[in-house]
Image (spheres, rainbow, N blue to C red):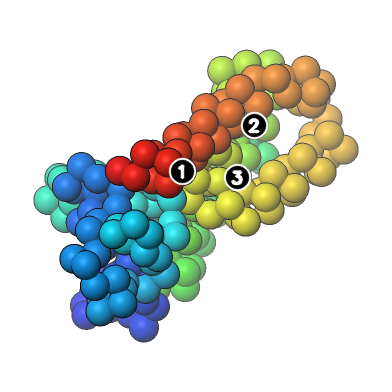
Amino acid sequence: RWAYPHYSWNRDELTYLWHVDVLRTGSLSAPDGGFPDLFRPWLTAALDGRLFSQYSLGWPVPLLVGDLLGSPGFALWAATALAVLGTRALALELHRDRLVAGLAALAMLGAPIVAIHSGMYLNYLFTLGLGLFFTTSLLSGLRLRSGPRVALAGALLGWIFLTRPYDAAIWAAVVFVFPPALTHGYGSFMTYGAMLVLGLILLIATVIAFVVALVVIGV
């Protein structure tokens, strides 16, 4: 938090932290106190006496875990590590050279996005790390003909969707368009498509369950 000790100008930070406070109570929404227009956190809506965030659980849950361990800031450290280690893992998978992978990780560690976003309660670094490991898991799974690795890639893509749906579409588009043409020796791209979909479905089911619990049940 050295970069923004009193939070940044981005109001999403406070919404995420409010969401963490709500989840800590064991609920997915908060009571509006009978005056929904008196206090309305940024990007929230009111329905039937409850306030709920527009965001799903992909990022608030890691923040909640960090909070339960002592501070939601722990999630920022984890997101930073995820992005740096994900860069190393993907570089190693693509180049098979530990020096290149190490240099790539150092470049990521020194990148402005890390210096800035490692001090903000935003999900950009976290999603970046998930995307890097998604790509690594998919490519290594195809190369090694490993169904579990491809299924893990699907689960990671689903988690990205649970965090930032648009980012999931971008990662999927890039990976699905290029690997079949560029990754010779990675096996048949379609062979493990079912495993990828299986992992993805598990996380998509989480999104559906979240919406049902929030809107239909009113948790």
Q: Nearer the viewer, residue 72 or 94?
A: 72
The image quadrant where one finds the N terminus is: bottom left
- Residue type at tag 2: Leu
Query: Would you place residue 109 above or below residue 144 in this image?
Result: below
N-terminal of the two: label 2 or label 3?
3
Q: Which residue is label 3 attached to?
A: 91
Q: Which residue is label 2 attached to?
A: 138
Q: Point out the frontmost of discs 1 and 3.
A: 1
- Residue 46: where, in percent of width, then height? 36, 64
- Residue type at tag 1: Val
- Residue 99: where, in percent of width, then height? 54, 46
Q: Residues within 10 Å of mark 3 (few under 14, many from 20)?
A: many
**Callouts 2 and 3 close, C-beta under 8 Å:** no
- Asked if one can make out residue 115 in the rendered structure from this viewpoint, the answer is no
Q: Which residue is label 1 attached to?
A: 211
Q: CA distance from mark 1 to mark 2?
A: 28 Å
Q: CA distance from mark 1 to mark 3?
A: 37 Å
Question: In which quadrant of the rendered view does residue 158 lie?
Answer: top right
Left or right placement of residue 73 versus residue 90 in this view: left
Residue depicted at x 67% and y 32%: 139
Q: Nearer the viewer, residue 29 or 6?
A: 29
Left or right placement of residue 172 versus residue 46 in this view: right
Q: Residues within 10 Å of mark 1 (few under 14, many from 20)?
A: some
Residue at the extreme left:
70
Q: Secondary structure at mark 2?
A: helix
